[in-house]
Amino acid sequence: MRYLCTIGDLKLIIGWDHDIFLKEGVAFFLSKLESSDYRGLEKMSKVMTDYVVTLSHDKIANFKSYFDFRMIRPDGQMVRILQEGVILKRDPTGNISLLLAMISNISYLKRNNRQHLRLTDGNDNLIYEVDNESGLLRKLDNLTKRELEIARMIGEKLTSEEIGERLFLSIHTINTHRQNIVRKLNMADMMEINNFLLAYQII
């Protein structure tokens, strides 16, 4: 597999020049992944492939994928990358043959030992988590519209009391929603969750 072109601040983000990616292709990219993240990427790629082949032509137009991985820079430092993918072309069997990928550095947003995958066709919103220590991949429960609404407000630095006043709900109800959000996404706190939801363009 090869890259047709690379543009933007690739060297600034991951430390490697455009030329080496164009010359050596996807094999070079994979060789610079942290080993447990490489295994996680294999699992996530299978889930994405299985999902993509089921999509109609109309749904493919709205398809996006998001996943993260750690990559080793030339100076030996590790950087966590979020890749957003848009399908430009599929082959006759429904598999991806041309993909537009956009990357960003999210090293400051996520803890180590876990990777995430988000798949959406504009309606479905599937989120998966890979535990890098155990190697297990599992689908996470979707947040409800109300939970997403509350997460947005928490991101705006509103307290549970202020959110309750806006939504005409009790503080107890708001706090129950907060606990459910943390449980569903298996994260440490609402700050980590809001960073994740923003980076993965869920809110």
Image (spheres, helix red, strand yellow):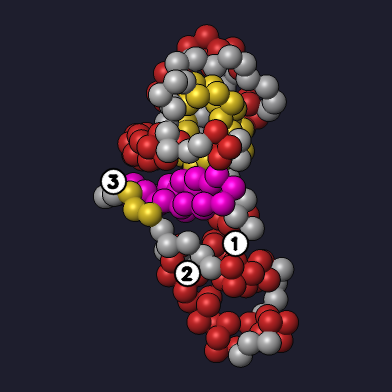
Q: Give the residues drawn in magenta, as a range.
A: 107-133
Local packing at callout 2 (Cα closer than 10 Å; few below 14, some 14-19, many 20+) is: some
| Dot 3 and dot 2 residues touching (CB under 8 Å) | no
Amino acid at the residue labelled 1: Asn
Q: Residue furthest top?
A: 23
Image quadrant in which you'd find residue 38: top left
Q: Residue at x 63, y 20 (%)?
A: 6
The residue tagged 1 is 194
The residue tagged 3 is 135
Local packing at callout 1 (Cα closer than 10 Å; few below 14, some 14-19, many 20+) is: many
In the rendered structure, does residue 75 fall within the stretch colored magenta? no
Q: Secondary structure at mark 2?
A: helix
Image quarter where the N terminus lies is: top left
The residue tagged 2 is 182
| Dot 1 and dot 3 residues touching (CB under 8 Å) | no
The residues tagged by marks 3 and 2 sit, at their Cα atoms, a distance apart of: 22 Å
Q: Residue at x 60, y 55 (%)?
A: 202
Local packing at callout 3 (Cα closer than 10 Å; few below 14, some 14-19, many 20+) is: some
Q: Position of residue 174 (x, y in %)?
A: 58, 82
The residues tagged by marks 1 and 3 sit, at their Cα atoms, a distance apart of: 25 Å
On screen, residue 157 above or below 12: below
> Relative to the observer, which residue lies in front, 108 or 135?
135
